[in-house]
Image: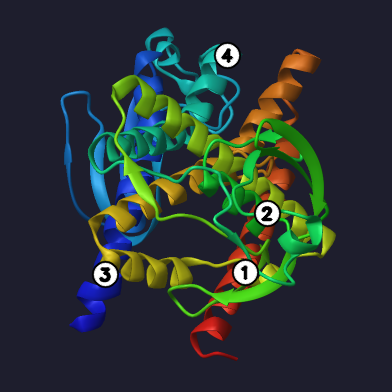
Amino acid sequence: MEFLFTYLLPFLILLTVLVFVHELGHYWIARRNGVRVEVFSIGFGPEIFGWTDKANTRWKFSAIPLGGYVKMFGEGEHTGGGASERPLTEEEKAVSFAHKRLGQRAAIVFAGPAANFIFAIVVLAGLFMTVGQPYTPAEVGSVKEGSAAAKAGLEAGDKFLEISGTSIQRFEDVQQIVRLSAGERLELLIGRGDKQITLYATPQVSEIKDRSGNTHKIGLLGVSRQGVAYVRHGPFKAVWQAMRESVQLTLATFKAIGQMIEGTRSAKELGGPVRIGQMSGDFAKSGFVPYIWFMALLSINLGLINLFPIPMLDGGHLLFYGMEAVFRRPINERIQEYSFRIGLALILGFMIFVTFNDIKSLFNV
């Protein structure tokens, strides 16, 4: 019972919300473009319960709660024939996904990831208006002796203005950049009194354990800050700051992926459903605000991953639509079929890999 309420329930709530938001993006734009939606499912496999609305869409919860889908009439077909047993009537073509214009189909596919980004911005803006945004002036409180900051010449009272071309507004911005820059030489534009000076520092590589006991390599500069303050914003500024935060989190994700490709960051840090479930429970135990923040972070990652140009993902479909726009005709169905098989193999391989990581992490192997 403790496992159920501490980990499984927070994980299922989080996953259900994010999947619903993603699929709702597809559904809403599809309906706006006159496409008939046959099924809106949270989960895969056999239906547990559901209902049919006035538009004849079946809304249901299915047995395997690891995802979801929206099934549109005519999806996957390029002609009135194809997989159909008979040619479509004109009325059916009018509500068929396959018979919509290229731009409409692309908009419907893109709407899923876009909904995840919009949801994250709305959630963060809500937090910034109610609880407040963590804000600490980007000033150095003290410098640790022998640290990367000390070697670079940083002094107490210095103010961070830019790091490697990125504008700094808060000390939290400094932390985010430095954590992802272990062993990298950073150019620091510093305000010291009424002067601006340029210093160079290489964050030291350090290992930390997160709430769930997973080990991560991060960069440390060796400077302290003053106490953290939470600043509440009005609606417009909250939305702007939420958009800015979302962009920074997206760029940080890209940088981490790039480091894994380069080999400077271990792929062991990648986690799957088990680790997400573990972290969901840990954040939920920390309180409502950390849990909601984690939900916003995962929503950004879900939207981002779905935009990767891998067949089976939304980004793969968008890639084919881009090629269709260039060649002015749909890509050969057999090529698409083999591409989707390769994409499925890649996704299954990735799931096996991250689940293996989860198991090793869980048992400290």
- Give the residue at mark 3: 285
Q: Which residue is drawn at 42% across and 33% down?
A: 242
**Residue 70 appearing in the image:** yes
Element on which disc 2 rests: loop
Element on which disc 3 rests: helix
How far is the residue under mark 2 from the one under mark 3?
A: 38 Å
Mark number for residue 269? 1
Q: Pick whichever of labels 2 and 1 is earlier in the sequence.
A: 2
Q: Pick whichever of labels 2 and 3 is earlier in the sequence.
A: 2
Q: Pick whichever of labels 4 and 2 is earlier in the sequence.
A: 4
Where residue 38 sits, quadrant-wise, is: top left
Q: Nearer the viewer, mark 4 or mark 2?
A: 2
Determine crowd level at label 2: few under 14, some 14-19, many 20+ residues with C-alpha closer than 10 A.
some
Q: Which residue is drawn at 29% across and 23% down?
A: 235
How far is the residue under mark 4 from the one under mark 1?
A: 38 Å
How far is the residue under mark 1 from the one under mark 3?
A: 22 Å
Q: Pick whichever of labels 3 and 4 is earlier in the sequence.
A: 4
